[in-house]
Image (cartoon, grey):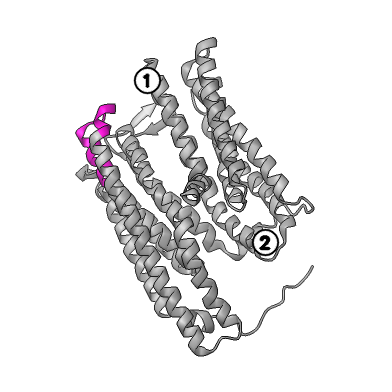
Amino acid sequence: MKAYAFSSLVTVGPMLLCMVMITVLQQILLHLEVSYIERMAFLAAVVYAFVFSLLITSGFSMVISRYIADKIYLREYNDIIASLYGVIAACLCLGGTLGAVFYWVSPLPGPFKLTAYLLFVELIVVWLQSTYLSALKDYMRIIRGYLVAVAVTITTALLLLNLTDVEKGIAMLLSLDLGFFTMIVWSMVHLESYFPKKERNYFDFFLYIKKFPSLLGTGLFCSLGFYVHHFVFWLGSPLQESVANTYLIAPSYDVPAFYASLSILPTMVVFVVSVETAFYEKYRTYYGTILGIGSVRDIKRAKTDMIQTLWQELSFMMEIQLFFTFVSLALGITLLPHIGFSSEQIERFNILVIAGFLYAVMFVVILLLLYFDDRKGAFAVTSLFLGSTIAITIAMLSLENYGFSFFVSTCIALVAGLGRLMYFMKNIDYYTYCLQPLITKEKKMG
């Protein structure tokens, strides 16, 4: 239970806390009877900051995960913290520029635009830091930092609302800014105390982007596929709403999707605690036997054990996620009507929860493919996922059966992912022995 608790906060902590803080602040605005327009402006600003900061960083996070893992394996710790500064600079340059242009042309008031923009750039840093924090072992210190950030957010919101005349939406955004700034500072101090700061190879990780471009595409396409159906509904469906002539959203779809996305968090935790522990031991034994002095019989036995454990752990993870899917459906049907959900929104929530189950399993399958360095297979599956989501969502717009397109596309991608994983396991000897380079090419210096 302790392992699951720590893994929950370290693995999905930043995202979960972000969702919790947004929900709490939204309820505060409802309690204060703030106008619908002001509440929608706050919600849209947060949704845009949350979604687009994830999209800016998702591809880089996949590459940087490989970079950190290789550096730790090679015991080259000096470059790790420098790469954090480098990837933050790169993502802030890209995302910060796009965000600045977006808000520059917006007719929103200056203070609102500034606080919304700060939230966007802070979330970019938070997502990148979370990739590095997963390498640390001081879980209690990480958790304390998250809890302090939540306390700062809620306290600031209450103080601004009760002691100042600041507009309610701006006050909520400013409290989020201070909360996430606290989280960033706390995490940065923790990371700098853990990793040495002897090197200044800030952009050394760009070599990994050049070496493993499919990792960048896999991370980006996986996240983009998760959100692209929202974009289609924002731009071309009857659900579309324009907020302050700046944001296009579809709240009658986005809100059910937000609550449905919470149902997939258990998979991320179970994967770290169960799959990555039990399976990794067999994985390491198999390749250790190949690289060591194991006989052919030992290698075959290790391979059989590894493949059996992989399917057992994947089945266990699916069973756990299926349980939470049923719980989410039951809770949604029971509780969501009490917070104003219509029957149509409940229906969308149910479809998206089931689609979330398929997405969670697909995501784990992609990670398992990357375990075996099948970057081509992982990229192909995520490309299919993104392409099918766009095509099916657009094709089904006239049917107005919102959410079903995402279910169909995740189902297609999951079948393809499982098929690729089964094919790889069946031919693992070929991929292990026959695809290795016969001649090592030395890099030319200068």
**Mark 1 — residue?**
30
Q: Is residue 215 visible?
A: yes
- At horizontal 61% and vertical 82% (from top left) the residue drawn is 292
Tell me the quarter of the image containing the C terminus.
bottom right
Principal secondary structure, stretch drawn in magenta: helix
Q: Which residues are magenta?
A: 335-351
Q: CA distance from mark 2 to mark 1?
A: 48 Å
Q: Is residue 96 above or below residue 34?
A: below
Q: Classify 10 Å Cα crowding around label 1: few (below 14), some (14-19), many (20 and above).
A: few
Residue 335, horizontal then vertical, whole percent: 27, 33
Q: Quadrant of residue 436?
A: bottom right
- What amino acid is at disc 2? Lys
- At horizontal 34% and vertical 58% (from top left) the residue drawn is 318
- At horizontal 40% and vertical 53% (from top left) the residue drawn is 267
**Mark 2 — residue?**
71
Q: Quadrant of residue 246?
A: top left
Q: Nearer the viewer, residue 425 or 392?
A: 425
Residue 374, horizontal then vertical, whole percent: 49, 70
Q: Is residue 226 above or below residue 112?
A: below
Q: Compare marks 2 and 1 and give the one earlier in the sequence.
A: 1
Q: Is residue 229 above or below residue 21?
A: below
In magenta stretch: residue 124: no
- What amino acid is at disc 1? Leu
Whether residue 8 sits left or right of residue 70 in the image: it is left
